[in-house]
């Protein structure tokens, strides 16, 4: 075995997050780990004749981003089937995307818009109507999921799922009906998302080889955004081990480009203990390798403790059996030394769960188990202190960037000022990290999360948090890098650019520390490296990309056309208004949904101009561009 590095990256501006050496210019990597971090003159002499050398061209380098809570295993299986409205800034553009996709989707396939967006991101500030969807798609089933509060189904989709006048109301949900009792095409989650899960599950699925292709394309999209690792929180309708076959195939073929630690999520109400007894006897904690590894239990431990985050509905009260059912499962986990994560939106749920954890701790200490709560939007100071005393953590996600307007409408702006209170959590010394909860209630884009923590704004532009509750950029970045390592029990192994750690890093499209705050959400990665391998490269780094993929399957997949966040595959279509912060600001300022080829969205500039187009009464001004027709 050679002592020389496999690869050296030089001539960069590397933000290491090491306090003793915060900036470097070069790194050397061997067998997937950093073996040297320093200046070019220190690192370059390590090169051997076979060492690959890549010039970073004085670009900024950051540690790879780690998502503390996402659903890549489930999301990857259907990514190529989904028309993603993540980041699309106008409903008009979104409907244009829908119209195109309907035109190429063969029967009996559906067109699915499965979360990752909020109506507030659109300049129109609304969802499409059922009339609009039916006009676009009279014959092709369309299923449109908005967060976990509702789904819109056109007439063809209602026929496909078999919802008719005599269909009974499902538990936990409502089928909205007309005066004659016929389903209208609107499903409401009351108080949980079961009806949305169950209806979506009725749609066609991809065959296994297509699911493998789909998951690879999802991972590449995450790499494009700078994500090098995730903790997968399981999910509804995601069974173990059946639904993990695809990710296992990728692991066996060394084709995973996003490191994945997975938690096991029970699927059987009132039978949760049996699930965890079976799993703890057949799966070893940390089973796997640095690319695909078991990470414990959750986020669903027992259904009686699940308070879904639909702020359009009142806070749900957990049933009286919550404590006894949760205790049964937690005792199984503690006895087997499995850590866990527990979905909990409201402090009331957290407080009751802590009663259980404290009771178990008195009998069998939780010391050394990296257990944590997810979400915790309304957590109290008392609950934070109780978590700290038990040695637990809190994994926050940017769901409020998507639902902040609904929260304020129900509880008021004052109540929303610290939801969740990240700064207080950090001040109290609790382990805290950040993520997305993608792909349904929020987008998988990490930069939206970073922007939310730094600016305190929703995607709709509403200022939720006062300055005293905002994070500085370095703290926010640490929430997405070194802080996440505790939650996957990998402290000291990942999250910084440091000798001995996993060699994962990115080159952001612009300087993260210097771009205007409102531009953070529009960053991507131009170079993404996982284990020393270039898994994504574009622009001046495209020649180094070691991760070519076959085209998205099937050939009519929305992924082939629109690619991903902000419809970046269509820079002259929906992407035109979604990929540039300037365009978005112009759209928001003028309030219209379309731009013209001459003025874009700079209508005010056109009106103030001295050229003939500034006169809306002239022939050129009145008819020569679409600004005046909008």
Image: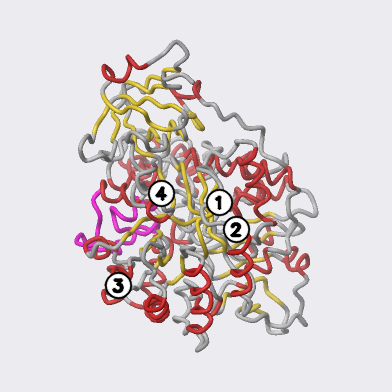
Answer whether labels 1 and 4 touch (C-beta < 8 Å).
no
Q: What residue occupies the far top of the structure in this picture?
A: 49
Viewer-nearest of discs 3 and 2? 2
How many residues crowd around disc 2 within 10 Å: few (fewer than 14), some, or many (20 or more)? Answer: few
Query: Foreground: 308 or 570?
Result: 308
Quickly name the residue at label 2.
283
Q: CA distance from mark 4 to mark 3?
A: 38 Å
Region rendered in magenta: 447-472
Percent position (x, y) of residue 349?
Answer: 42, 78
Viewer-nearest of discs 1 and 4? 1
Q: Which mark is residue 490?
A: 4
Q: Which mark is residue 287?
A: 1
Quickly name the residue at label 3.
413
Q: Is residue 439 left or right of residue 163?
A: left
Q: CA distance from mark 1 to mark 2?
A: 7 Å
In reply to whether residue 469 is colored magenta, the answer given is yes
How many residues crowd around disc 4 within 10 Å: few (fewer than 14), some, or many (20 or more)? Answer: some
Q: CA distance from mark 3 to mark 2?
A: 45 Å
Answer whether labels 1 and 2 touch (C-beta < 8 Å).
yes
Q: Earlier in the sequence, mark 1 or mark 4?
A: 1
Percent position (x, y) of residue 41?
Answer: 26, 16
How many residues crowd around disc 1 within 10 Å: few (fewer than 14), some, or many (20 or more)? Answer: few
Q: Earlier in the sequence, mark 4 or mark 2?
A: 2
* Residue at figure coordinates x 44%, y 26% from the top left: 30
Q: Earlier in the sequence, mark 3 or mark 2?
A: 2
Q: Earlier in the sequence, mark 4 or mark 3?
A: 3
Q: CA distance from mark 3 to mark 1?
A: 45 Å
SS under mark 4:
loop
Q: CA distance from mark 4 to mark 2?
A: 19 Å
How many residues crowd around disc 3 within 10 Å: few (fewer than 14), some, or many (20 or more)? Answer: some
Q: Which mark is residue 382?
A: none
Percent position (x, y) of residue 98?
Answer: 63, 51
């Amino acid at each position: 075995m050679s002592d020389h590095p496999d690869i050296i990256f030089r001539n960069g501006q590397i933000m290491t997050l090491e306090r003793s050496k915060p900036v470097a210019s070069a790194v050397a990597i061997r067998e997937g780990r950093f073996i040297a971090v320093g200046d070019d003159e220190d690192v370059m002499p390590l090169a051997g004749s076979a060492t690959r050398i890549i010039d970073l061209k004085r670009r900024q380098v950051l540690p790879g981003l780690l998502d503390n809570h996402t659903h890549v295993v489930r999301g990857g299986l259907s990514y190529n089937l989904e028309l993603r409205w993540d980041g699309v800034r106008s409903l008009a553009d979104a409907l244009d995307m829908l119209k195109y996709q309907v035109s190429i989707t063969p029967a009996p396939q559906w067109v699915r818009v499965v979360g990752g967006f909020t109506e507030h991101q659109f300049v129109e500030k609304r969802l499409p109507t059922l009339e609009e969807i039916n006009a676009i798609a009279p014959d092709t089933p369309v299923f449109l999921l908005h967060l976990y509060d509702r789904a819109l189904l056109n007439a063809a989709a209602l026929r496909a799922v078999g919802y008719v006048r005599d269909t009974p109301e499902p538990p936990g949900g409502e089928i909205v009906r007309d005066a004659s009792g016929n389903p209208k095409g609107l499903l409401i989650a009351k108080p949980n998302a079961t009806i949305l899960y169950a209806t979506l599950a009725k749609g066609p699925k991809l065959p296994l080889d297509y699911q493998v292709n789909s998951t690879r394309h999802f991972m590449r999209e995450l790499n494009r955004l700078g994500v090098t690792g995730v903790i997968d929180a399981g999910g509804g309708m995601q069974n173990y081990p059946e639904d993990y076959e695809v990710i296992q195939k990728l692991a066996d073929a060394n084709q995973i480009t996003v490191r994945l630690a997975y938690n096991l999520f029970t699927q059987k109400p009132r039978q949760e203990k049996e699930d965890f007894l079976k799993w703890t006897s057949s799966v070893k904690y940390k089973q796997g390798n640095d690319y695909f590894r078991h990470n414990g239990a959750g986020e669903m431990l027992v259904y009686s403790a699940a308070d879904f985050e639909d702020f359009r509905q009142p806070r749900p009260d957990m049933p009286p059996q919550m404590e006894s059912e949760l205790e049964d499962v937690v005792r199984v986990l503690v006895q087997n030394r499995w850590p866990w994560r527990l979905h909990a939106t409201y402090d009331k749920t957290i407080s009751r769960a802590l009663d259980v954890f404290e009771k178990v701790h008195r009998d069998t200490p939780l010391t050394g188990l990296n257990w944590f709560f997810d979400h915790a939007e309304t957590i109290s100071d008392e609950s934070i202190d109780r978590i700290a005393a038990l040695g637990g953590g809190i994994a926050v996600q940017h769901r409020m960037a998507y639902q902040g307007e609904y929260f304020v409408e129900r509880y008021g702006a004052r109540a929303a000022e610290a939801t969740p209170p990240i700064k207080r959590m950090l001040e109290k010394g609790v382990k805290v990290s950040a993520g997305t909860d993608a792909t349904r209630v929020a987008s998988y884009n990490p930069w939206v999360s970073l922007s939310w923590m730094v600016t305190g704004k929703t995607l709709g532009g509403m200022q939720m948090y006062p300055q005293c509750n905002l994070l500085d950029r370095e703290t926010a970045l640490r929430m997405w890098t070194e802080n996440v390592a505790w939650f996957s029990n990998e402290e000291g192994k990942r999250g910084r650019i440091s000798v001995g750690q996993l060699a994962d890093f990115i080159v952001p499209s612009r300087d993260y520390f210097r771009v205007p705050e409102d531009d953070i959400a529009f960053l991507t990665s131009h170079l993404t490296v996982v284990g020393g391998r270039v898994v994504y490269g574009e622009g001046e780094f495209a020649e180094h990309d070691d991760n070519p993929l076959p085209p998205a399957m099937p050939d009519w997949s929305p992924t082939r056309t629109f690619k991903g966040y902000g419809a970046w595959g269509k820079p002259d279509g929906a992407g035109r208004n979604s990929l540039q912060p300037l365009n978005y600001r112009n759209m928001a300022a003028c309030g219209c949904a379309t731009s013209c080829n001459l003025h874009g969205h700079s209508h005010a500039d056109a009106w103030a101009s001295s050229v003939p187009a500034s006169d809306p009464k002239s022939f050129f001004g009145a008819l020569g561009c679409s600004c005046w027709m909008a």
